[in-house]
Image (cartoon, rainbow, N blue to C red):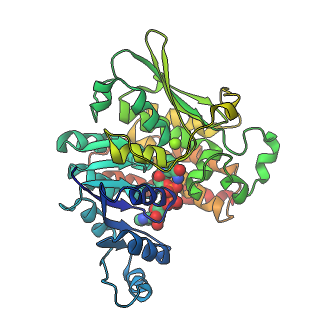
Amino acid sequence: MKVQNVCVLGATGSIGESTLDVISRHPDRFRVHALSAYSRIDKLVQQALASGARVVVVPDDAAAGHFRALWPAGTPTPEIRVGAQALADTAADTEVSTVMAAIVGTAGLPAALAAARAGKRVLLANKEALVAAGGLFMQAVRESGAELLPIDSEHNAIFQCLPEDAGRERAPREPAKGVRRLLLTASGGPFRTMALDALHDVTPEQACAHPNWSMGRKISVDSATMLNKGLEVIEAHWLFSMEADRIQVVIHPQSLVHSMVEYEDGSILAQLGQPDMRTPIAYGLGFPERIDSGVGLFDLARMKTLDFEPPEPGRFPCLSLAYEALRAGQSSCISLNAANEVAVDRFLAGGIRYTEIPRVIGECLERLDGVRCMPRTLEDVLEQDRHARAVAAELCTLRA
Ligand code: NAD
Ligand code: MG
């Protein structure tokens, strides 16, 4: 068995941690080459010690100094690299075979794209990379022959439910034959049944308390607004070459069915499992083999019921905004994603109310509606992203 040399981008986050947990169960299969972190340098030190990482990537010299100061004397120090360019270079390093792209937000795009361009096995958790630059990203996968495996649980489920030949096609140009629709499940988040007028007063802590999944703060808020599901519709569009009308979202509060594929003959294939990201992560790491993820037995008898219901548009306006952006094109998807990142940051910092998040995104999309030009390069994408962020920041200030 060939040992995979893994680079974990965003190692200190929720997905990064779960990835290192799975890797630690298979020392014969994986070696940790590099780890990156933006903050929580103490945690990075512990992870580098435990995994034997050869390289660590941190954002600036202060973080590098902090890392050195915390590193135990007498133990060989990993190579410390600094900055965003070093992050992209490390993801493309010839020594790396597999890259886990688990940075949150558009900040993760340049390094994820570098891994795709370098033809790596790319385990993609960073959905914002596909939302902002789906066309460029999939083109890079096609041109380099990279092996793209979706880690987002819904897309991983769909990947598992597609016919083998379609599943093996890493960047399809058309939908898999015989598939009618993709059915994306959503938990509905913590506010699925809350009175609509109470949403005005919800706190960041309430929004981050997801009923089934334990995740980073940004994606937790996205799950509450269901903008997360909107980003996932766009992600599914790119991964499976499926138009918006053939991607349906259904609320499934138990989070046990992770998504489904509906075929022309009426068959529906679903993937089930506990809500634990180590399952899709192990699928991607071990592909095409199945390896232990540390997830225990699933007790069907305790499951009792599986409920499904349509999302209420009045409760989840962000979902419709995402469909609109997908239909409008790449520039609108960049605006949607950038405005959301800014609005969620402000909400988490106590700067705007929860109910302002969809308003900021909607207004930002309207204001930038005329500026639709197809981004052709990474620089174009980042430029449009910066512009949308500036507009969204101004809108947040007006609504504070
Ligand atoms: P998190 O907030 O727990 O971790 C984010 C990681 O990115 C951290 O290591 C952080 O240091 C790093 N980071 C943050 N800002 C950065 C920057 N500007 N530059 C470089 N690194 C930076 O997030 P998470 O929940 O692990 O999510 C990571 C990604 O995976 C997101 O795109 C999310 O949508 C996706 N995802 C997460 C889950 C989940 O269960 N957590 C499920 C599906 C998809
Ligand atoms: Mg998901």
Q: Which residue is at the front of the view, 329 or 247?
A: 247
Residue drawn at point x = 69 percent, y = 53 percent = 209
Q: Is residue 171 left or right of residue 24?
A: left
- Up the image or down, 10 lies above or below 385; here it is below
The percent position of residue 311, horizontal first and vertical second, equals 66, 30
The percent position of residue 72, horizontal first and vertical second, equals 41, 87
Count every numbered label the image shows and give the total.
0
- Up the image or down, 211 lies above or below 237; here it is below
Q: Is residue 358 left or right of residue 35?
A: right
Q: Which residue is at the front of the view, 98 or 360?
A: 98
Q: Which residue is at the front of the view, 371 or 284?
A: 284
Residue drawn at point x = 71 percent, y = 55 percent = 353
Q: Which image quadrant: the C terminus?
A: bottom right
Which residue is situated farthest in the top direction here? 265
Residue drawn at point x = 66 percent, y = 28 percent = 306
Q: Which residue is at the front of the view, 247 or 161?
A: 161
Q: Is residue 324 left or right of residue 148?
A: right
Residue 160 in sight here = yes
The percent position of residue 199, horizontal first and vertical second, equals 76, 47
The percent position of residue 272, horizontal first and vertical second, equals 54, 33
- Up the image or down, 300 lies above or below 289; here it is above
Residue 107 in sight here = no
